[in-house]
Amino acid sequence: TMAIYAADVTPPSSIYEPGDRMRKTVIHEFTHILTADAQYGPGAVLSDILGRVMTAGDPLSFFIMLCTAPPGALAPNWYLEGLSIWSETEFVGPGRGRNSYSDMIMRMPVADHRTLPSNQWDLHLPEWPYGEAAYLYGMITFRYLCEQYSAPTQTNMPGALANSVSHSFMFNFDACALPLVGTTFGALTDRSRYEETQKQSARIQSLQTATLTPLTLLTPQRLQVNQPKFDDSGNSVLF
C-alpha cells in the first residue's frame, strides 16, 4: 500500500525538482514494493508454510521471521533507496540521478576529503548528510553499475541484481552480485565511491578555476526588502 501526499516538497529537500513529481513518487515507492516483497527459493517455501512471521520478542519467533522474510526486506538501506532512485530517474527523466542539488551534496564530502564508507550509508546517520546518505550513496552505486556493466552489455543490471537478491536467503546479500558482475556488493560500493571521488574532484577543479558571475543590484541599496514587493508605479517588483 502506498500513501502519497499531493502537497509538493520544499526546495531544501533533494526530492524537490520540477517535473512529473507525482509520477516520480509513484515509481519510487512502487520499486520499494517490488524490491521488498519479491521472494523465491528456500525462503519462499518457508513463507508458504509458515507465512510472514512478525517477531514476538522471543528468539524462536525472531529466527523464524528472519527465515521467512523477503531478502529485499533484509537488504541495506542504501540498496533499497539507491535502486528506487535509479527507477525514478530511468523511467521518468527528472530524478535525483540527474538532480543538481543531489550532485552538490555528493561534491561536498569530496571537497572536505571525508566521503562516507558504506557501513554509514544509513537512514539514521546522525551527521550530515543525515538520512540522505542512504539515498545518494546508493544512487551513485547504481549509477556506477549502469555505467560499467549495463551500458557495455545492454543489460538491465539493476533489475538483474534485484532478481538475484530476491532468490537469496537470509543474510547472503553481499554475494548476490557475484554471479552477475564477478564481485560483491561491498566491493562495488568501494569502487563507486572511488569513481564518484574522481568525478567530483574534476568538477571541483573546474569550479575553482571559473570566475564568479557578476550580479547587478537593481534594487536601490537604501531599501530593505524582505520579500518581493511592487514599487509605487506597479510596473516593477523589488527583491
Image (cartoon, rainbow, N blue to C red):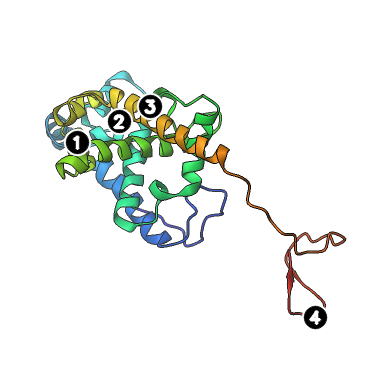
Which numbered disc covers residue 74?
2
Residue type at numbered disc 1: Ser
Q: CA distance from mark 1 to mark 4?
A: 66 Å
Residue 212 pos. (x, y %): 63, 47
Q: Residue at x 18, y 30 (%)?
A: 181
Q: Is residue 100 left or right of residue 169?
A: right
Q: Nearer the viewer, mark 1 or mark 4?
A: 4
Dot 4 falls on a residue whose secondary structure is: loop
Work out whether 213 lies above or below 75: below
Q: Earlier in the sequence, mark 3 or mark 1?
A: 1
Dot 1 falls on a residue whose secondary structure is: helix
Q: Earlier in the sequence, mark 1 or mark 4?
A: 1
Dot 3 falls on a residue whose secondary structure is: helix
Residue type at numbered disc 4: Ser
Q: Residues within 10 Å of mark 1 (few under 14, many from 20)?
A: many
- Residue sitting nearer the eye, 5 or 86: 86
Q: CA distance from mark 4 to mark 2?
A: 63 Å
Q: Residues within 10 Å of mark 2 (few under 14, many from 20)?
A: some
Screen quadrant of the C terminus: bottom right
Q: Identify the residue under disc 4.
A: 233
Q: Residue at x 45, y 35 (%)?
A: 202
Residue type at numbered disc 3: Tyr
Q: CA distance from mark 3 to mark 2?
A: 26 Å
- Residue sitting nearer the eye, 205 or 35: 205
Which numbered disc covers residue 194?
3
